[in-house]
Image (cartoon, rainbow, N blue to C red):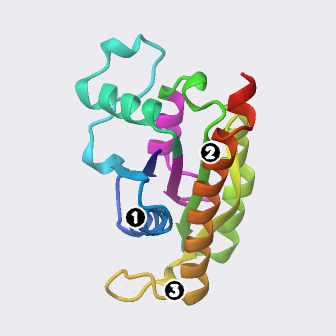
Amino acid sequence: MKLLGISGTLVGTKTCILVEQVLVEAKRICPEVDIQLLDLKDYQVEFCDGRQQSSYNEDTQKVIELVSVADCYVIGTPIFQGSITGALKNLFDLISPQALRHKVMGFVANGGTYQHYLVIENQLKPIASFFRAFVAPGSVYAHTDHFNEKNELVDPEVRERVAQLAWEVVHMHWSLKSGGVHAHR
């Protein structure tokens, strides 16, 4: 099982920290899980404009391939102006819907106001629905106050939600793979 964590931002560190913590927890729960982090700020991803995948630059092609071959995902974004980042939306636009179909997604987000937690429900879950992906029932939203001055996640309730999300993603993937929808395709 390949679990890909996606930090869907080009700035800051809190989103990446949240995604990494879910990946580490998933590995702790299920040591055979192959975890990988895709931090979008490490790549020069071109804007999606409808052309063939082969005509994008190497970084864009590599990112598309990493996403396409993963079995399940933990996808993170900071919330800016009440929305996901443009970088993450661009990534979704680059990916073929068939690449994400029937795969499990878990979501994490962070922001400066407590109201932004609804972006997971109102924006990320509908995107997953478009891709016909399965969504973990829980999610993680972390406010700036949940981190200390070193950007370490210190809030015990948020840390518990991180652990729960990791369990849900791993459990859902294995449950579906062992006889659910994959057996009836």
Q: CA distance from mark 1 to mark 2?
A: 17 Å
**Callout 1 secondary element:** helix
Q: Is residue 23 left or right of residue 100?
A: left
- The quarter of the picture where the C terminus appears is top right
The x, y position of residue 144, in whole percent, is: 50, 79
In which quadrant of the rendered view does residue 130 lie?
Answer: top right
Give the residues drawn in magenta, as a range: 73-93
Image height of 16 relative to 154, above or below:
above
> Mark 3 sits on what residue?
145
The x, y position of residue 163, in whole percent, is: 56, 73
Residue type marked 3: Asp
Mark 1 or mark 2: which comes first in sequence?
1
Q: Is residue 78 magenta?
A: yes
In which quadrant of the rendered view does residue 167 lie?
Answer: bottom right
Mark 2 or mark 3: which comes first in sequence?
2
Residue type marked 1: Glu
Q: How many marks?
A: 3
Q: Is residue 42 magenta?
A: no
Q: Is residue 180 left or right of residue 163?
A: right
> Mark 1 sits on what residue?
20
The x, y position of residue 134, in whole percent, is: 70, 43
Local crowd at mark 1 within 10 Å, few (<14), some, or many (≥20)?
A: many
Local crowd at mark 3 within 10 Å, few (<14), some, or many (≥20)?
A: some
Q: CA distance from mark 2 to mark 3?
A: 29 Å
Q: CA distance from mark 3 to mark 1?
A: 19 Å
For residue 8, say whether it is visible: no
Return the mark for residue 104. 2
